Amino acid sequence: MLNELDSFYEQGKLKNAEALLDASLSDAVESKNYSAVLTIYNELEGLYRTTGRADKAADISDKALELIVQMGLGNTTHHATTLQNGATANRVAGNFEKALDMYCQAAEIYKNLGQQTSYQMASLYNNISHIYQGQKQYEKALGYLNKALDTVSQIPDSEAEIATSKIGLALCLMSMKRSDEAEKYLQEALEYYESPVGSTDGHYGSALSAMGEFMWRKKEYDTAVAYYEKALSVTLNRFGENYSCKIIRNNIERILKQKEENF
């Protein structure tokens, strides 16, 4: 099932992926295969979140955490991963305090399991930074982003995670009006995303949007639109029509309007 699911994701067939997960969940519940149920809950949570249904993602993450307790998996890697997934869903849904509490619970579990320098811990730092950026607490956000970059830089073959961290740092630095530092991180990240491996990464569209925002702030309107249009194309090909596409289109409209007003 997971191999078939990956195939659908690679082809951008998200409706097929959701239908497969729904059917597999029914089978797993009927056969009382709770390990499979937990796996499918986590997959559905991610799918709902990336297709603009954050509230539904948060609801299913609660079901997953209930199942963790029923299965006696408290304070295990499974528990931490499920907390992390649920926290991300709640963050996207705007439930910031709940999300932060869940991230902190997950971090404590990873530390107790000796996974302080893992991908999972770096991901937690990145996600916690998103919450603080949403609350405009940029210094706190920057601190967690630097922790994330320091963590993944210690892990071999972590180019994708390093690029993700650099995009986060660039966005935060832009908000703090530290443009030169932001540009450096953006250029370094795009070197990865424009490589053969990086161009298939799910974060490529976000990186292009970040560069679009940077050029927009510099009032280089045509260049900004070009980056946003490429981001839209990449996002549509990878995920289909979703909330990110709406944001990108709105940004393009705003840039074109500003260009018209300034010339």
Image: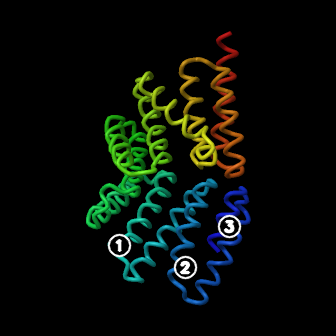
The residue that mark 3 highlights is: 18
The residue that mark 1 highlights is: 76
Q: In which quadrant of the rendered image does the N terminus lie?
A: bottom right
Q: CA distance from mark 2 to mark 3?
A: 15 Å
Q: Are marks 1 and 3 in contact (CB under 8 Å)?
A: no
The residue that mark 2 highlights is: 36
Q: Nearer the viewer, residue 60 or 24?
A: 24
Which residue is at the far front?
156
- Badge 2: how crowded within 10 Å, few (<14), some, or many (20+)? some
Which tag, 2 or 3, sits closer to the chain's start?
A: 3
Q: Quadrant of residue 253?
A: top right
In this view, the mark in front (1 or 3): 1
Which tag, 2 or 1, sits closer to the chain's start?
A: 2
Residue 188's spot in the image, x, y percent? 49, 33
Q: Quadrant of residue 233?
A: top right
Residue 217's spot in the image, x, y percent? 54, 22
**Kind of residue at badge 2:** Ala
Q: Nearer the viewer, residue 200 or 180?
A: 200
Which tag, 1 or 3, sits closer to the chain's start?
A: 3
- Badge 1: how crowded within 10 Å, few (<14), some, or many (20+)? some
The colour style of the image is rainbow
In this view, the mark in front (2 or 3): 2
Q: Secondary structure at mark 2?
A: helix
Q: Residue drawn 57% across and 73% down? A: 40
Q: Nearer the viewer, residue 185 or 100?
A: 185
**Kind of residue at badge 3:** Glu
In this rendering, position of residue 135 left or right of residue 241: left
Q: Quadrant of residue 9?
A: bottom right
Q: Secondary structure at mark 3?
A: helix
**Kind of residue at badge 1:** Thr
Q: Are marks 2 and 3 in contact (CB under 8 Å)?
A: no
- Badge 3: how crowded within 10 Å, few (<14), some, or many (20+)? some
